[in-house]
Amino acid sequence: MEVTLTAIKADVGSIGGHLLPSKGLVARVKDVVAEQGKDFLCDHFVGHTGDDIAILMTHEGRAHCEAAHRLAWDAFKAGTKVAKAQGLYGAGQDLLKDAFSGNVRGLGPAVAELTFEERESEPFLLFTADKTEPGAYNLPLYLGFADPMYNSGLILSPSVGQGFTFVVMDVEHTHGDRRIELSTPEDAYDLAALLRDNGRFVVESISSRADGEQAAACSTTRLRNIAGKYVGKDDPILIVRTQKNFPATGEVLAPYGIGHLVAGFMRGSHTGPLMPVVAGTGVSFFDGPPIVSCLAFSMREGKLSEPADAFDHPYWDWVRTKVSQKAHDIRAQGFSGPAMLPYSDLEYGGIKERLKKLEARFTVEE
Ligand code: F6R
Ligand code: MG
Ligand code: MG
């Protein structure tokens, strides 16, 4: 059976600042998805990470399916009403346009979609991250799909060892979608040269070279490009199919043990380590640190198993302690040097205004 996974994520309001959505808000989104999806969805799941709500849908309508996109839009709109009634912070903040026009791409919410012929057993992972940007997945995807130090399947399994094709999007390009296709292992260094720049080059999809099947789909939304000004980070969503010709689940998860430094900590304007957390976790320390959760599913004829929380394990408790130390260390240096993002990525205009004001007070001695 050909099935499509559509995952759509948005921040439509949260408790106490940007911490997490209220139970009433999540319940309203769940109700709308269940009611409006009952005639065409095979199955669905609704969860949240930090202040973002994620809707996962399985259906036979292929990517860009209007009914699935409309459903998510309507659910987030209904959720926004609850957020407003409860006085939640940032009610409806990721819904940047007033009207739905057939597809939520370009309207604010983050979208990741994959269409494929379902395997006999179909394991996949749903990653959702908060207080960061789509490029936060660049390093873990590179290591999990292209580096034998993380993916031993690249040398142990003949099919995995044929490598993968990465589609990378230049998210700074605003007139049309600018993409490049690179295949590993032969293009591994070129790929690394692009993926080092998380703010500009983002992995959009990955496919197996053994059978051409798509393994991963990542959101590439840029709220700034849609709104024309900075309106917050683009908290990204990622789907990864695993096992057989794809990396094993554990190989995809392993790179999150690094707690690598990403953009989006405190006021969307600082660098911080990405902490793998249990699903439903909010943020706290300096409105962070940046967090990522991962739910593993199996699927048969579009019906989902219950999720298994991939980061709910004693190993990840140890990682969280390590990452907390890293978060503490970088925040301890406040605004200094790489702790704060470059001018172009700051969420607030205050620093530029200050510099402008100071221009007249500079003196130059020849
Ligand atoms: C939100 C974020 C937060 C806010 C901060 C101030 O994505 O990163 O750190 O920037 O809570 O929010 P405002 O300016 O809305 O009071
Ligand atoms: Mg927010
Ligand atoms: Mg968020």
Image (spheres, rainbow, N blue to C red):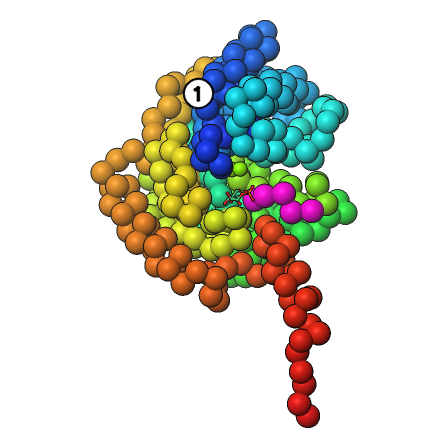
Q: Residues within 10 Å of mark 1 (few under 14, many from 20)?
A: few
Task: Decide if residue 253 is on the left or right side of residue 138.
Answer: left
Does residue 108 appear in this view? yes
Query: Relative to the observer, which residue lies in front, 270 or 194?
Result: 270
Question: Is 97 contained in the magenta span?
Answer: no
Task: Decide if residue 97 is on the left or right side of residue 17.
Answer: right
Does residue 244 appear in this view? no
* Residue occupying image coordinates x 69% and y 66%: 356
Query: Relative to the observer, which residue lies in front, 248 or 110?
Result: 110
Q: Which quarter of the image is occupied by the C terminus?
A: bottom right
- Which residue carries the number 1 mark? 23
Determine whether 251 is above or below 194 in the image.
Answer: above
Task: Decide if residue 309 is on the left or right side of residue 355.
Answer: left
x and y percent of residue 152 in the render? 34, 48
x and y percent of residue 227 in the render? 70, 41
Q: Residue furthest left?
A: 314
The magenta region covers 229-233
x and y percent of residue 310 in the render? 34, 33
* Residue occupying image coordinates x 49% and y 43%: 131
Prevailing secondary structure of the magenta residues: loop
* Residue occupying image coordinates x 72% and y 45%: 228
x and y percent of residue 237 in the render? 51, 36
The amino acid at mark 1 is Lys
Find numbered disc 1 in the image and state the secondary structure of the residue it sits on.
Answer: helix
Q: How many marks?
A: 1
* Residue occupying image coordinates x 54% and y 25%: 87
